[in-house]
Amino acid sequence: MSKRLPVLRVREFRYLLLGQTASLIGDQVAIVALALFVTRRTGSASDLGLVLGAQATALATLLLFGGVWADRLPRRRIMITADLARAVLHLTLAGLILTGAVRLWHVIAIETAFGGAEAAFRPAYGGLLPQTVPDELIQHAAGLTNAADNASLLIGPAIATALITGVGAAAAFMLDAATFVVSAALLTWVRPRRRGGPAPAGLVWHDLRAGWREVRKRAWVWVTIVAFCGVLVCSLAPWIVLGPVIARNLFGATSAYGVLSTLIGAGALTGALIAARARPREPLRTGLLLLLAWPMYGCALALGAPFWTAAPLAIAIGAGWALTRVWWETALALRIPNGALSRVSAFDWIGSLLLLPVGYALAGPLAGALGAQTVIGAGATIAFVIITLALLRQPALSTPARRRRDGAEGAGRTCRPVHDPAEDNPGGDGNHAVRSPVFTRYVADQ
């Protein structure tokens, strides 16, 4: 395995991957446990909405500030602190459940604080990952971490269901807390390499503006974020909300929704593993082309396509999303200055999260007025237009040149980027990348 995936030979990355795999599985266990516990206890989907909304609001509100601090302070320490804080929070919730003292406001308060801790963790993680491997192995690392993320979507819910039905919700939250402790312990053994200096400390608002300039001056960054946002709001949100109804109407059973969702997850896992090594000539344009599978899927459902047509499209959208995310994360790691990487990562997360609740909120009422298939078809059409415009606006951005000796021979060697002055202009007008595409090349140190 290490010969095919030399990134696994890197000690720091192995510890990071093991810790994050455990934590991601715990996260999925907690999400399902939270949903089942709240709905069983209160019998109200609205109460679950309040809990999830409180967590999402805290995450979205504090994410940019998390990016600022992750560019200033040691990212590993921020992640350890956030892991331990989340462990204490869910251990507290488990204790309240065991003693019978838990109330809805307890759950809302705990999940709000949990969202705040996650807002500190995510940007720090986005900046730390490239510091655990040589530059030439960043794409391998991104592929494996995305594969672990997608595998957790398949494993976590099964564990959660077994724990809740067999032992109780408290056990699920205790398991999640334990995975955070494991992650924090493994992070203490990670010794990240230097990739440029930290961001200079200044006023928080000034740092936020500087991070936004890093996004704005690179057309390939903000165009891709807009495309992701369009797919999530116009295609993913309607599918999650209306999928069960559409599955029942088209295929005769809501269980078909679960099967198609599983196929999406399987496609994403496969795509992430492929992406660890696949290097198209223009990865971001290729990724946007692959994202067109989402509107194709929505249009197929809107037109009443049979299951045998929907199933391969479901696999394609999972694989396409995973491939695009890996190439995107690799491009950010290689082309964004280290001192701004966490802030740019935070803006990426904000672009994904900010409008997604709007998509959730609108899908149901619109389906009630127009019909579920009409809504998912209209969303697919809008997503198609957004992706097409993004393809037209996306500047040419080549993949880093392949090394002659890719694999075990190159795992221990370092690479240095060939300097491109276009990337050093913090006052760019936002169009520079279009006029002069950045072709980052890497040469081996001899």
Image: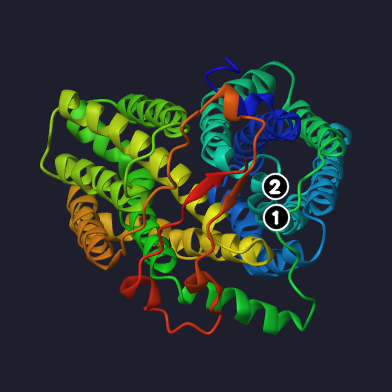
Q: From the viewer's perspective, is 305 left or right of 1?
A: left
Residue 181, above or below 342: above
Q: Tell me, yes or no, if residue 202 can be seen here.
A: yes
Dot placed on the residue nearer the N-terminal end, 2 or 1: 2
Q: Residues within 10 Å of mark 1 (few under 14, many from 20)?
A: some
Position in image of residue 47 (x %, y %):
61, 52
Q: Nearer the viewer, residue 379 or 6?
A: 6
The residue that label 2 is drawn on is 131
The residue that label 1 is drawn on is 195
Q: Nearer the viewer, residue 252 or 320?
A: 320
Q: Nearer the viewer, residue 119 or 279?
A: 279
Asked whether the residues under the numbered discs 2 and 1 touch, taking CB atoms below 8 Å apart as contact, a structural biologist would say: yes
Position in image of residue 231 (x %, y %):
34, 54
Q: Quadrant of the C terminus?
A: top right
Residue at 57% in and 17% down: 3
Mark 2: amino acid:
Gln
Q: From the viewer's perspective, is 218 left or right of 280?
A: right
